[in-house]
Amino acid sequence: MNWDNYELVWSDEFDYEGMLDESKWTYEDGNHQWPNKELQAYTKSLDNVFVRDGKLTIRSIKQQDGEREYTSGKVNTKGKGEWKYGYFEVKAKLPTGLGSWPAIWLMPAYEDRVIPDGLPKTRDGRLNYMEMTKEQWKLLPKLPKERHWPECGEIDMLEHIGRKKDWVLFSLHSGKYNHRQEEPNPYSRGVQLEEGFDDKAHVFGMEWTEEYFEFFIDNKSLMKFERVDYDHHGWPFDKPFYLIFNTAVGGGLGGPVDDDALPYLYEIEYVRVYQKNK
């Protein structure tokens, strides 16, 4: 990687205690069924998300919340930190334990729809599509196809699973390339690492440019995806995205859960974003 002209534009060093700095972070919560058949509810409770001793900890535990048997944490920078291209660096110790599924990922920073009053919602404030009448559906503003997943794009800077503790996954998802296709996604690759990888913290990096994504661990390049498409269907990454950190419990990639391995502890020491001077 060439550091020429890169400068720090956003960071959190977690040099405070308790709740997250909400000028930088938003909590995502809810005990509905999250995608990928995940088993957790997400909360903003200090049981699940807290800053202590210079680290952000996302803690996943066996705890009933509605129909969900586990609770965990999910936080993002939407509306508070959004970037088009740059170098992203995170120092973190990933959680261990069968069923853990931590990630560092980015989603496009679209503005939220304005939802009319009177539409049915779930207990956690989300739209309840199952209870909408035909008349209420007509009131709901429609989103263009390019804003729906996977056309909108998704950047997975890092995924890890407890059942493959010395393995990580790097992925880009688009309408043309995603895990729902019959053919393997050419922009999704797992990397086998040295035994004991999950025993300590590592520095995870990603350079995102107009022409490629390159992924690093401890300053060593492990994967590079070169651009081959110049339309939104194949490369929807020329727009601002925001960061997300979470630990899912179980689910399609997480797999079976070993309750004796809980709590899962995802410890993040810093998050830094660099961009080039213009």
Image (cartoon, helix red, strand yellow):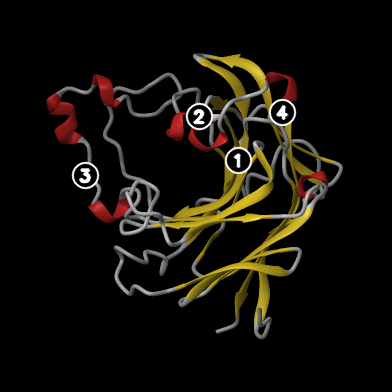
Q: CA distance from mark 1 to mark 2?
A: 12 Å
Of callouts 3 and 2, which one flags the residue occurring earlier in the amino acid sequence? 2
Q: Residues within 10 Å of mark 4 (few under 14, many from 20)?
A: some
Secondary structure of the residue carrying tag 3 is loop
Q: Does the residue at mark 3 contact the one at mark 2 (Cβ under 8 Å)? A: no
x and y percent of residue 240 in the render? 46, 63
Q: Is residue 256 left or right of residue 21?
A: left
x and y percent of residue 231 in the render? 29, 70
Q: Which residue type does callout 3 highlight?
A: Lys
Of callouts 1 and 4, which one flags the residue occurring earlier in the amino acid sequence? 4
Q: Which residue type does callout 1 highlight?
A: Asn
Q: CA distance from mark 1 to mark 4?
A: 15 Å
Quarter-of-image position of residue 73: top right
Of callouts 4 and 2, which one flags the residue occurring earlier in the amino acid sequence? 2
Q: Which residue is mark 1?
A: 246
Q: Nearer the viewer, residue 51 or 148?
A: 148
Secondary structure of the residue carrying tag 2 is loop
Q: Which residue is mark 4?
A: 46
Q: Which residue is mark 3?
A: 142
Query: Looking at the image, is 255 positioned above or below residue 216?
Result: above
Q: Is residue 177 left or right of residue 55?
A: left
Of callouts 3 and 4, which one flags the residue occurring earlier in the amino acid sequence? 4
Of callouts 1 and 2, which one flags the residue occurring earlier in the amino acid sequence? 2
Q: Quadrant of the N terminus?
A: bottom right
Q: Which residue is mark 2?
A: 38
Marks 4, 2: nearer the viewer: 2
Q: Does the residue at mark 4 contact the one at mark 2 (Cβ under 8 Å)? A: no
Q: Is residue 88 left or right of residue 234?
A: right
Q: Which residue type does callout 2 highlight?
A: Glu
Name the residue: 44% across, 25% down. Answer: 33
